[in-house]
Amino acid sequence: MRQDIYIEDLKQHVGKEVTLRGWLYTKRSSGKIQFLDLRDGTGICQCVVMKNQVDEATFGAYDKLTQESAFAATGTVQEAAKAPGGFELFTKSIEIISVAHEYPISPKEHGVEFLMEHRHLWLRSSRQHAIQKIRHEVVHAIRNFFDERGFNMLDAPILTPNAAEGTSTLFELEYFDEGKAYLTQSGQLYGEAGAMALGKVYVFGPTFRAEKSKTRRHLTEFWMVEPEVAFMDLAGDMELAEEFIEYIVQRVLKNRRKELDTLERDITKLENIKAPFPKLHYDEAAEILKNYWSEMNPDEKKERFASGHKEFIYGDDFGAPDEAVISGKFDKPVMVHHYPSAVKAFYMKRDPNEPDKALAMDMLAPEGYGEIIGGSQREDNYDLLLERIKSHDLPVEAFEWYLDLRKYGSVPHAGFGLGVERTVAWICGIEHVRETIPFPRTISRIWP
RNA sequence: UCCUGAGUAGCUCAGUUGGUUAGAGCAUCUGACUGUUAAUCAGAGGGUCGUAGGUUCAAGUCCUACCUCAGGAGCCA
């Protein structure tokens, strides 16, 4: 009996006759024996065609099938140590479904611009396929983590009337007779409203930043997951964050080993990602930077300045190169907490014991992947929050609903935001976040 | 916005102190090959050197402006 099956299930069909359907990845031939690598989305299978075993039409299919042509192959599944994946199809017949035009992405290397221009096709390549499988696993792990802990998912609006942290980086649009609307930068404020209704919530969705950032860590459209929990303080926030990251990384290790192998990821670095993570007070992190600069000789200093790294001054926020110095000291993600409140967002609560510091934390990924989490305990006092909105020159009317949360049963609460693309880039060990999202939006790309 | 780098065949690149007809690999096409792994081997076709000016007997190469892309800074996840 023949049946249609997927390549990932081949091992259950050894010795049986099956039909595989998919696309031609590559082909090789030595005259009277042909090898066609069939890709079906679940894997790649080598189809072996021998001239003296098949009819003329099937043997002739090799010449007609161009790269990425669609076809069905029927034959017997065999174990084959030399075949990619360990199995091959000893092919009896081939049915051509559609012949592809000359395919632009050849097996040799290509430049970034060319690949991005063909992103819709590039996704078929094995590395891109592996990255999307891992992204899916990460998203699944995120949802499982919160669902298992009794969190309620809360969908925040994409179209919003106001900014979370200033107005310079918003995508703006006309909203009927209501004036301007903006694409959301963060669902956090809505998450806070949700936490007061449901106790524990997480917002999960796309966010938009019109910043003109052109680095391997930035996209204008990216996905963020933002848990928010009533009655949780900063310490609880950090515990939740480290448990969360451990969960995601270990899940990918368990379920996506094959894809990590495809990406040639150093697994040992990921196996090490287990809570607790190092936690540094801002002052301790500042000390690391102070020592870093004081131990440097003048030539090295000149080099650092030339690369754009400015010498750290106590009280400043950390720049990307500073973060690299701090995270470089550890082989796990590092959490830095108690940043100066002057450099942090208006909604972050100040520490009553250190009034110049915010109850805020960032998590820096290892291996130079930068900030993957930013979080804080939120200001829960109505008067202080109102004062903060005013001192940040934000329009009070726009935040009236948000201030209501402090009017009607205000409680301590905290949360954080995790950037999905930076997390996936780190786990995959790839250079740039643009490869972690199917259709990246950057400052100079809105196509395809 | 600022700093740095790059635009040469469909793709990835080489091209010397300026010098005659601009090269290679892959892809495409033709042929050979019964166990290939980015198969191999032999052959063929394929170019307004990013755009516009300028210097020169002579410009892919030098100069100016502009365009596009990439990496980084700032800001952030």
Image (tube, coloured by chain):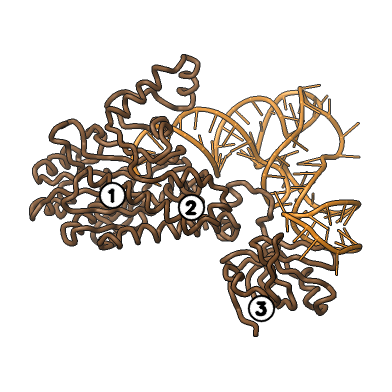
Chain colours: A brown, B orange
Proximity of marks 1 and 3: CB atoms separated by less than 8 Å: no
Chain for numbered disc 2? A
Closer to us: B13 or A246: A246
In this view, the residue farthest toward the bottom is A1
Residue at mark 2: A436
Q: Please, is residue A280 above or below residue B9 in the view?
A: above
Dot 2 amino acid type? Thr
Q: Going 68% across and 55% down the picture, which residue do you hit? A: A106
Tag 3: Cα neighbours inside 10 Å, few (<14), some, or many (≥20)?
Answer: some
Q: Nearer the viewer, mark 2 or mark 3?
A: 3
Dot 1 amino acid type? Leu
> Which disc number belongs to residue A240?
1
Closer to us: A339 or A406: A339
In the structure shown, which secondary structural element does the residue marked by tag 2 occupy? helix
Chain for numbered disc 1? A
Residue at mark 3: A16
